[in-house]
Image (cartoon, rainbow, N blue to C red):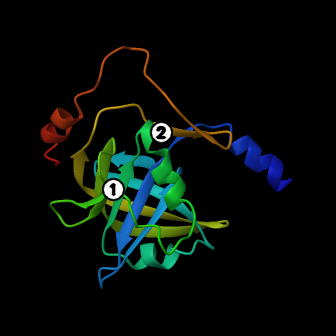
Amino acid sequence: MESRRLRDAFGRFGTGVAVAIARSHCGVPSGVTINSFVSVSLDPPLVAFGLASRAHCLSHFLEAPAVAISVLRHDQKWIAANFSRPSAARWTGMPIVTSPSRQLVVRDALVAFECVPERHVTAGDHVVLMLSVRHVLAGAAGAPLLFFSSGYGSFLPDHGSQSDWGGACAAMGWG
């Protein structure tokens, strides 16, 4: 199958956009934009995302003791663009804050998941990282940033109500 055609076909599936940040045992941060983030299980709470096997940051994520995933708002596409390409200056001017459990998260993201790695699996030209969710940090209100057909956009639910993420997190004992 022609790879460009397959890539275009995959691009017809809209996905949320998030930033994954890991710190080495020495505290050196590594961050990357992801759109392959997926909830896997509620019990136990598991999430996963994929990184290209050739990604500059793959070894950092495979060796990290913890990983934080920040789900971006529609007005944070500049953050997604920044973390989508390698750059020595990628941390300059970024709204990154340290959470109460000492993980790095994007300030005012929709929600952040603080995780510990469970396992990883090589899948074709990617590595899928499975993470156990330890804390959920309720974030700012807003519409999510989406990626569709090689471009960014947003989505507003048609039901007209906002979910109470803070209440849901507290009810689950997270946060």
| Distance between mark 2 and mark 1 Cα atoms | 16 Å
Mark 1: amino acid: Pro
Q: Where in the figure is residue 160, as x and y percent of width and height?
A: 35, 14
Q: Nearer the viewer, mark 2 or mark 1?
A: 1
Q: Where in the figure is residue 141, as x and y percent of width and height?
A: 29, 33
Q: Where in the figure is residue 2, as x and y percent of width and height?
A: 86, 53
Q: Residue furthest front?
A: 93
Give the total of numbered labels.
2
Q: Check disc 2 and report its element: helix, strand or loop.
A: strand
Q: Residue at x 41, y 45 (%)?
A: 72
Q: Residue at x 43, y 15 (%)?
A: 158
20 left or right of 167 in image:
right
Q: Earlier in the sequence, mark 2 or mark 1?
A: 1
Q: Check disc 1 and report its element: helix, strand or loop.
A: loop
Q: Residue at x 82, y 47 (%)?
A: 5
Against 130, residue 60 (above or below) is: below
Name the residue nearer the viewer: 54 or 128: 54
Q: Where in the figure is residue 84, as x and y percent of width and height?
A: 55, 59
Circle 1 residue: 95
67 left or right of 89 in image:
left
Residue 26: which disc? Answer: none
Q: Residue furthest right?
A: 2
157 left or right of 53 in image:
left
Q: Residues within 10 Å of mark 1 (few under 14, many from 20)?
A: few
Mark 2: amino acid: Leu
Circle 2 residue: 145
Name the residue nearer the viewer: 37 or 83: 83
User: Residue 14 lies in what quarter of the image?
Assistant: top right
Against 142, residue 114 (above or below) is: below
Against 76, residue 114 (above or below) is: below
